[in-house]
Image: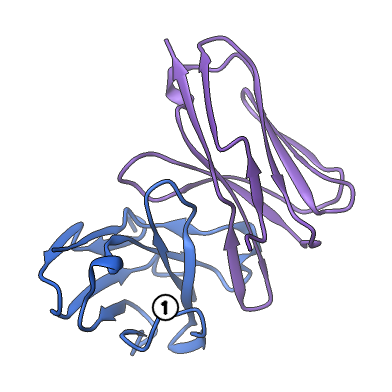
Amino acid sequence: DTGVSQNPRHKITKRGQNVTFRCDPISEHNRLYWYRQTLGQGPEFLTYFQNEAQLEKSRLLSDRFSAERPKGSFSTLEIQRTEQGDSAMYLCASSPITGGNGYTFGSGTRLTVV
Amino acid sequence: TQLLEQSPQFLSIQEGENLTVYCNSSSVFSSLQWYRQEPGEGPVLLVTVVTGGEVKKLKRLTFQFGDARKDSSLHITAAQPGDTGLYLCASSRGNQFYFGTGTSLTVIP
């Protein structure tokens, strides 16, 4: 297992388009988290899954944001009708259920909305 | 309002100097993590502290969790250019997960 994998690494899209990002977590990890990070700031929690169940989604930034983890393995984060303010790094992390020992992050997807 | 406040926000020092960065909160946490992040990459876990007053060492890095488990510090001895990066503290409460505001460290050769 090579860690948490995110694809694509970079995405440039026009305002109003939909985008989807994929995250493949460490296979033994039950939990998967999505964060957004803007330049010079710490990551901002968006949502997380335990297996296929989405346990928290109130921090998703708007109803244009949605995430799925249909089989409890990989996850996707979709942003509909992108806006320039959505430009950021989107990070995925995974952990065992006892996440208090920290998370393993992917390298992120850098989204630029033009 | 940030649950985890870090200071200083920016720090630029010469190679060989010592430094301390801080992570403070008004809330009590059951555990706290420190991460280091390089540009264009995800954060990498350095340490987890769990017990109030706990001190952990990782080579030249010393981490301390406050007695009341509301604050933590990271001390770097004899900083090297390879220590350059964004240092982040993080914790969780229930189903919410928080990162600090970050300290951007630059070590000048």
Above or below B106: residue A23: below
Q: Is residue B87 left or right of residue B56?
A: left
Q: How many other residues sit within 10 Å of disc 1, few (<14), some (14-19) or many (≥20)?
A: some
> In the picture shown, does residue B80 fall above or below A67?
above
> At 74% across and 44% down in the image, what residue appears?
B72
Q: Position of residue A112 (x, y in %)?
A: 19, 60
Identity, as a three-letter code, of the amino acid under mark 1? Leu
Relative height, residue B6 to residue A92 (above, below): above
Q: Secondary structure at mark 1?
A: loop
Residue at the location (10% across, 70% down)?
A: A14
Identified at 43% across, 23% down, the residue is: B82
Q: Say whether residue A17 is left or right of residue A20.
A: left
Which residue is more in the foreground, A84 or B100? A84
The reply, left or right, for residue A65 in relation to residue A15 is: right
Quadrant of the frame with the C terminus of chain A: bottom left
For the N terminus of chain A, the quadrant is bottom left
In percent of width and height, residue B36 lies at 49, 41
Against A52, residue B78 (above or below) is above
| x then y, percent, for residue A3 | 36, 56
- Residue at 62% of width from left, 22% of height from top? B60
Image coordinates of residue B62 in percent, x first then y, are 70, 30
- Residue located beneath label 1 in the image: A61
Q: Is residue B51 left or right of residue A37?
A: right
Number of disc labels: 1
Q: Quadrant of residue A80?
A: bottom left
Chain assignment, label 1: A
Q: Colour of chain A?
A: blue
The color chain B is rendered in: purple
Q: Nearer the viewer, residue B74 or B59?
A: B74
Q: Quadrant of residue A106?
A: bottom left
Q: Colour scheme in the image?
A: by chain
Quarter of the view holding residue B98: bottom right
